[in-house]
Amino acid sequence: MKKSLVLIVSCLIIGVLLLPFGCGEKVKPIKIGINAPMTGDIPKVGEGTKFAAQMWLEDIQASGGLEVGGKKYPVELVIEDNESKAESAVKANTKLITEDEVLAIVGPQSSKQAVPAGGVANNYQTPMISPWSTNPNTTKDRPYVFRGCFLDPFQGPVLANFIKEEFGYSKAAVLYDVASDYPKGLAEFFKQAWENLYGPGSVVAFESFTTKDADFSSQLTKINRSGAEVLFTPQYYNEVALIVQQAHELGWNKPIVGSDSWGSAETVKLCGKDCYGLFFSTHYAAAGATGATKAFIDRYNKKHGYIPDDVAALTWDSLRIVQEAIQSSGQLTGNVAKDRQSVRNALARIKEFDGITGKMTFTEEGDPIKCAVIVRISDKGEFEFYKSVCP
Amino acid sequence: MEFFFQNLINALQWGSFYALIALGYSMVYGVLMLFNFAHGDIFMVGAYIGFGVASALVGFSAMGALALPNWLILALTIIVSMFLTSFVGMIVERVGYRPLRNAPRASAAITGLMIGIILETGNLALLGARRVSFPSLIKSTTYDLGGVFVTNKKIMIVIVSLALMYALHRFVRKTKWGMAMRAMAFDFVVVPLMGVPINNVARMTFALGSALAAVAGIFFGVAYPVLDPYMGVLFGWKAFVAAILGGRGSILGACLAGFLLGFIEIFVPMIFPSTLRDLIAYSIILLILTFRPHGFFGEPYSARLRL
Amino acid sequence: MKATSENSPKSNRSRARAFREYFSGVPLLGWLAGGLVAVLLERFLGTPLAHLLGLPKVPVLFGCVIILKKPLLIPGTVIYLLLVYVLPVGIVARLCGSVINRLVSWLFNLSPTFSVIVHLCLLYGLLSIWSGISAYRLLTLKLTLIAVIVTLSLNIINGYMGEFSCSHPGFMALGAYSASVVTLLLFVDDRVFGAALLPEALGPFMFPVALIGGGIVAAVGAIAIAIPSFRTRGDYLAIISLAFMFIVKSMIENLEIVGGPRGLSSQPNYVNLPTLFLWTVAAVWIINNFVRSVLGKALNAVRDDEMAADAMTVNTRRTKFVAFLFGAFWAGVAGGLLAHVLRYVNPGTFGIQKLAEVLAMVYFGGLNSVYGSIVGAVGYSLLSEALRPLELFKWIIIPLLLILVMIFRPTGLIAFKEFNVMNLIRPKGKPIREESTSKGGVLIRS
């Protein structure tokens, strides 16, 4: 028994020792980290991120790698689960940066994780791009952190102006999730914009609920009574379905307007006919999309059986931005710290990027300037392009 | 005034979910003195089973194999899911609770919590992260009663829930099994010595509680047709509050506390700014417990408890 | 402990016992010295050795991540672990056993306090060298140490007092926010509170005050639970504390001044490893003394039989009150530390998810035991970090493991065991369990 053990161990040692020599000289792959919530509160967001990232990787692999400075590099994705927790996101980012030595990080998606994780990326001077986080703190004073979506201060006025022009109403109600960063921020910016248009008191009901709530009847009853002419609810698609249906059940028959978080195929699937004819602002319109956007949607739909939501599209764009930055950085030295620096500089230099969610440029803070699209949910349940609003 | 009635009706519906789930907690708590933290996730499993059964039945009748009217599909869904979910409950009891019957009570609470996590993650692994939409079996009709909007769904949910609660009450009061359950709640140590089959009673308790949770899950799917794997977590913890608030082993207490919780959560945003809802709602619960430390129908007990 | 695992596949029981006896003469200091040699070895020879074995990098967290992600590299990793950890620890511990034993007994006779300090210095050296190899290790270590404090503080209430409290995330939130507000207000130019009120250089010295302040705020919050819930015996503490947790979360969400749901960020980076290590040692020491004091014994009496305790002149209400506040205090301190390690807090962090995690750590490690809490916190933290590559299935394996622990050891891994420092640092004697802070990841296997 002892002999066989010795034999096995020595075989292993020899095998392992030979392993690195057998493979020969390899080009060091480019590693991109993905920090996404695969478990926890919002696994759907993690899934979209992962699928989009894998599609991107397929593209790269199909073309034989990423060409930088005339040399093809294989690409590796390192996907880490942040469990939708802040400390886990910090751990995941630290691991990606120091252990996996990734060149750049895409993610985390929600601000709850992106703000602390951005701090880590900035400390270690690693370029990070959060596709979905709208909290200003994510990128503020952090030269290495970028984002792929527009900020709330832009979207709020866009929607307020749209409602004014489209319907001419002057009394609005807002229903939002007080415990979630994004809806709360957007609700407040909308309120501000609306009051700039119609003066204080024109937002007649400013109601809230808490994440994971399913019953909004109390708030909706209050909104019904307030005499509001339009309801604005910057919620995620699962809540949108519930809010719209319950509003209709409680006798609300005026328009409901939403924000980019509505932009998921699931919205219509979950909400059904109740959502037909409603408007929302978003990054891109799936129905009637053209060119690269359409190609992306069709491919995703074919592969995973549903139309990608905005997280997937934004992740895709963020990865493409990273790709372009890597390619335009000239050449890779193999020294990760140096390469990260040059990728960061290349990212900041990107002036015009033509993504599937629209053209964008980055500000000093690392935030993109891009156009918003107003989408109408058609009577067939498709997202129809209605108009485009640029800053 | 109609504002008040509108909220009253909303609160009745919302409260009946809490009450149905709290009953499951309360029965386990009464009979075995254990916190069944997996119950919220059994509610989730019940909703998903209901979703599966309903989709299958809708699919069958769409294929023309058997043309069933929608109300019959709903009734069948409820019965089949109650049956299936009660098995889930019994398995949970067998795996997570029976081995721990003589362990400190908190350990069983932890196994419950962990089984809950397994159920959530298992669902996530099996069905993916997609949220599913419960098939709309009942066409929602809204009645306008002088400014108060009532839907047929709401009426059905409240009535069926109340009927089930009454049925449970009769069961516990009038049948032999019910008597055994009450006896166990009365004294955990001596009653089994009197020949009450403790394992069967425990299994029965879990089965009943899970069946009720399944009904709650299906109604939840009917009223709020978006299901996700984590839907039971917060719901479960809140129903847990209601169950304990009702008093140990009291069915009436759990129902009342469930409705009370629903009423508080609906009426607080009616009166106060809705951002403060949780703050005020749970402060009220704290206040109630300060003055009524044994819950509504609980008795102060000084008998030595396990741990 | 580590050495046994190397031998276990082929060993039957008697051989394992012989093996254990072989190492029984090694005092704790010997193990620490062995560990120190191992981490020094890794520090200076780790990278070349890893390259030689075909590993891309020095394996982090004892190679778990590599093993789960790249099965091809398993042999290399195992050999690496053998060469760097198991063999040096075993050899040093065994060979220098007698020498160190003499040293230990000399130290012990000289002054036990001094001996403890020597042990702690060695432990700190070991941890700092181990974590100095990569920032990821350092972060994992920091969060683990914080988890130790939290778990200990909850064990006071759920273990020693025998109640079921669900409010720990709430206490942590209170502590985290209070400490953050103090440091942000006084020492940092930030967006929320404006310019620093005091010179920044003063910050690190005032930081303990901020932490203690956070702990006190948490303890004051605990009064709100303690008053209604200790009027009666029973499970009402469970729901009162749960309600409290919801209240705290909702309150912070509504306080715009501390950022609402957006949270507070850019806390100063005060919590480095030595600070955190000192705080953890202080927490373990104070809590251990607390539970072994008269008050702690009274607490156990109250748990076992409140009426009898009352009859024996224990002031039950006061005892419970003090213990509850004490537990809340340390949870608040841990919250403050967590906020400054992550340098960000938001109310969403302190919800049901956190509660489940903290409860799991307490019951996993063992009730009524300082040992157990350390083992539970370290084991759970390292396990959840090591299984990270499994993504979704991690959350099936960890709960399953916990269920098994609960079924076979209902009170947790190491329950009802006194943490006796004198026994730990004593020379030789019976087989000595090594201090788990250093290698808790292995201890779970034992």
Image: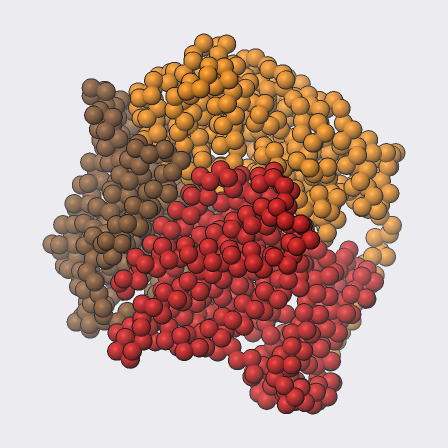
Q: Which quarter of the figure has residue A323?
A: top right
Q: Residue at x 76, y 24 (%)?
A: A351
Task: Please state, as top left, top right, bottom left or bottom right, where the N terminus of chain C lies in the image.
Answer: bottom right
Q: Residue at x 23, y 32 (%)?
A: B8
Using the image as rendered, state which of residue B22 and residue C258 is in the foreground: C258
Kindly indicate which chain is depicted in orange in the rendered structure.
A
Q: Position of residue B130 (x, y in %)?
A: 49, 37
Q: Position of residue B233 (x, y in %)?
A: 40, 47
Q: Which quarter of the figure has residue C441?
A: bottom right
Q: Position of residue A174 (x, y in %)?
A: 43, 25
Residue A302 in sight in this render: no
Q: Position of residue A265 (x, y in %)?
A: 51, 27
Using the image as rendered, state which of residue A193 and residue A13 is in the foreground: A193
Does residue A15 appear left or right of residue B125 in this picture? Answer: right
Does residue B168 appear left or right of residue A278 in this picture? Answer: left
Kindly indicate which chain is depicted in brown in the rendered structure.
B
User: In the orientation shown, which residue stands out farthest toward the front?
Assistant: C198
Residue A349 in sight in this render: yes
Does residue C229 appear left or right of residue A162 in this picture? Answer: left
Q: Residue at x 41, y 16 (%)?
A: A171
Q: Colour of chain C?
A: red
Classify C40 as above or below A56.
Answer: below
User: In the orientation shown, which residue stands out farthest toward the left?
Assistant: B174
Classify C413 as above or below C104.
Answer: above
Q: Residue at x 72, y 57 (%)?
A: C134
